[in-house]
Amino acid sequence: MGEKILRKPPRIKVLEAIGCIGDERIKVLDDERARVVSSMGDREYYVVVKKKNENEYLVYSSDNGTIYRGYIGYPIIAFLMLRGEIPIDRDVMKAMTGVPWKELNERYRKYSIVENIVMDRAERIGVSREVINDYINIVMKKLGIKKFYFDETLGKA
């Protein structure tokens, strides 16, 4: 199949990624590999991120967004955050901890609705939409200046 370039993810995936870290659902195996447990705890994703050069990566993640929809899935983003290549905002992380992502995504079937729900929840605990939107924009900009090549052979490791 070869390598295909992954697209930037929907904005909400940035929030899912940082929530995954806050929920301690990501386990780093080594410098290039990690395992991520889904928000419901019923799935585990295998993640590989290999740096080709400063702005290019060979990646694999077994989540649906990466494999079937062709965008950078939240497990990859979370791993990049833990590696220090994407910034972590502690306030946003606290606000996104404990969110039942899969349940919300399946119930509402529209990321914009789910994003609104988690933003309302964050505001109730004192984290403004402006702070969250600024953070999403920073992460999306950083993802946009890099190229991520999906390599399914990495998943066989």
Image: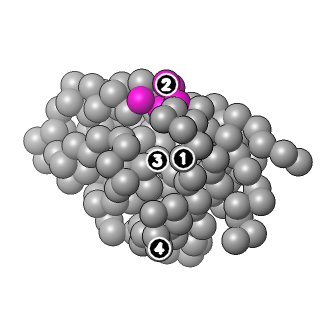
User: Is 13 in front, or is 51?
Assistant: 51
Callout 4 amino acid: Leu
Reading the image, the residue beneath label 3 is 77
- Could you say whether the residue bearing mark 1 is in a helix, strand or loop? strand
Whole-number angstrom distance, CA of label 2 to CA of label 1:
14 Å
Check if mark 2's residue and mark 1's residue have beta carbons within 8 Å.
no
Reading the image, the residue beneath label 1 is 51
Callout 1 amino acid: Lys
For this orientation, the residue located farthest to the right is 1
Residue 106 image point, x, y percent: 58, 52
Dominant secondary-structure state across the stretch colored magenta: helix
Residue 45 image point, x, y percent: 59, 66
Left or right for 115, reference 47: left
- Could you say whether the residue bearing mark 4 is in a helix, strand or loop? loop
User: Is 51 in front, or is 94?
Assistant: 51
Number of marks present in the image shown: 4
Reading the image, the residue beneath label 2 is 145
Residue for point 54% across, 38% down: 53
Whole-number angstrom distance, CA of label 1 to CA of label 3:
14 Å
Reading the image, the residue beneath label 4 is 29
Pointer 1 local density, CA inside 10 Å: few below 14, some 14–19, many at least 20: few
Task: Report the magenta residues as a range.
Answer: 142-146
Whole-number angstrom distance, CA of label 2 to CA of label 4:
26 Å
Residue for point 63% across, 57% down: 61
Asked whether residue 67 appears in the rendered view, the answer is: yes
**Labels 2 and 4: the sequence-earlier one:** 4
